[in-house]
Image: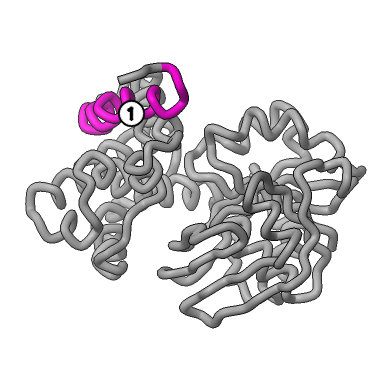
């Protein structure tokens, strides 16, 4: 299969690298110093599951250099998606499928508006990784995992082929019974941890050990749970408890990407994380006061990062 990975950061670099290592044709769409390093020295991945190196990779900042592909893995940040969509047209072929692996619960809707429901799958990825430097990915926690599915949850031929291809690349891949449930389960986890971590600037080990911050995480999860139910998303009744058990299993030094971006003064995904919880809650008539507090507390830093405020 011919893949394009739109966004060669931690997520796109890791999964795209694994797919390329398995012998599939993979092209990375990147920019800046990351692109320069990929072109010059290839991709380096340091992983708790085994390091690997791809000394030669296909990398460009111009999708027209790649042309039509079978699969586009969309792994940009949520705030980059609208601009990315504008440049994706050269990747379109008669059977091209778009698989978003973004945090949040709305990326597939934005892609569908541009490319049509029939060309878009719902996808999610789980991995704790970071871009350690240009062309250099560090996978430091969690078993790398991809879930994908049709919007109507059909186990279609293309979904089964894609699952088989990713599995052959050594990636744990699942077709959930309900992909929307899986998407919201991840959303509940990452938004709660990430938001509380960004406000407190503390690593996960501290957040889960202090009763006060642990309660903040669980209450943020409860708000998202109630919102999901109001939208017809079938989350398990015990999802907060099981998610906190997972939180307790993660490395104590862990931080979410949202927290790292805000601490570094970079644009973040806050609008698509806690901001989306507040917005969707308001539209659905569901109170989400803690997520609203987190979003509003971080909003000045976000606006400064994107150049809308100076202080």
Residue lying at the far bottom of the rendered structure: 50
Residue at the disc numbered 1: 301
Q: Is residue 85 above or below residue 307?
A: below
169 horizontally vs 80: left or right: right
Q: Is residue 213 above or below residue 80?
A: below
Look at the image and tell me in which quarter the N terminus lies. bottom right
Q: Give the residue at x 54% y 51%.
A: 178
Q: Quadrant of residue 58?
A: bottom right
Q: Quadrant of residue 298?
A: top left
Q: Which residues fall within the magenta stretch?
A: 289-308
User: Where residue 108 appears, x then y in whole percent?
Assistant: 62, 38
Front-most of 216 and 147? 216
Q: Quadrant of residue 59?
A: bottom right
Q: Give the residue at x 45% y 34%.
A: 267
Front-most of 174 and 168? 168
Residue 4 in sight in this render: yes
Magenta stretch prevailing secondary structure: helix
Let me know if residue 293 is in the magenta part.
yes
Total label count? Answer: 1
User: Where residue 116 appears, x then y in whole percent?
Assistant: 76, 32
User: Where residue 296 appears, x then y in whole percent?
Assistant: 28, 24
């Amino acid at each position: 299969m011919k893949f394009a990975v739109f966004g060669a950061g931690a997520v796109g670099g890791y999964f795209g690298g694994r797919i390329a290592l398995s012998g599939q044709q993979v092209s990375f769409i990147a920019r800046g110093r990351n692109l320069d390093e990929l072109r010059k020295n290839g991709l380096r991945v340091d992983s708790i599951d085994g390091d690997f190196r791809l000394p030669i990779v296909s990398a460009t900042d111009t999708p027209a250099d790649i042309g039509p592909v079978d699969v586009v893995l969309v792994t940009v940040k949520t705030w980059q998606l609208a601009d990315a969509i504008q440049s994706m047209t050269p990747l379109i072929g008669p059977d091209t499928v778009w698989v978003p692996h973004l945090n949040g619960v709305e990326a597939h809707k934005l892609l569908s508006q541009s490319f049509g429901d029939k060309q878009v799958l719902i996808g999610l990825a789980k991995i704790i990784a970071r871009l350690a430097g240009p062309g250099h990915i560090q996978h430091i926690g969690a078993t790398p995992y991809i879930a994908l599915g049709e919007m109507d949850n059909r186990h279609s031929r293309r979904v089964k082929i894609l699952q088989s291809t990713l599995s052959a690349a050594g990636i744990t891949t699942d077709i959930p019974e309900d992909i929307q449930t899986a998407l919201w389960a991840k959303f509940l986890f990452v938004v709660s941890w990430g938001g509380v971590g960004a406000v407190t600037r503390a690593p996960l080990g501290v957040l889960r050990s202090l009763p006060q911050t642990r309660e903040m995480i669980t209450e943020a999860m409860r708000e998202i749970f109630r919102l999901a139910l109001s939208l017809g998303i079938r989350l398990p009744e015990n999802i907060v408890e099981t998610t906190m058990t997972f939180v307790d299993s993660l490395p104590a030094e862990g931080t979410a990407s949202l927290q790292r971006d805000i601490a570094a003064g970079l644009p973040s995904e806050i609008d698509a994380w806690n901001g989306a919880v507040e917005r969707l809650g308001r539209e659905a008539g569901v109170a989400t006061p803690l997520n609203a507090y987190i979003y509003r507390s971080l909003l000045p830093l976000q606006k400064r990062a994107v150049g809308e405020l100076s202080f």
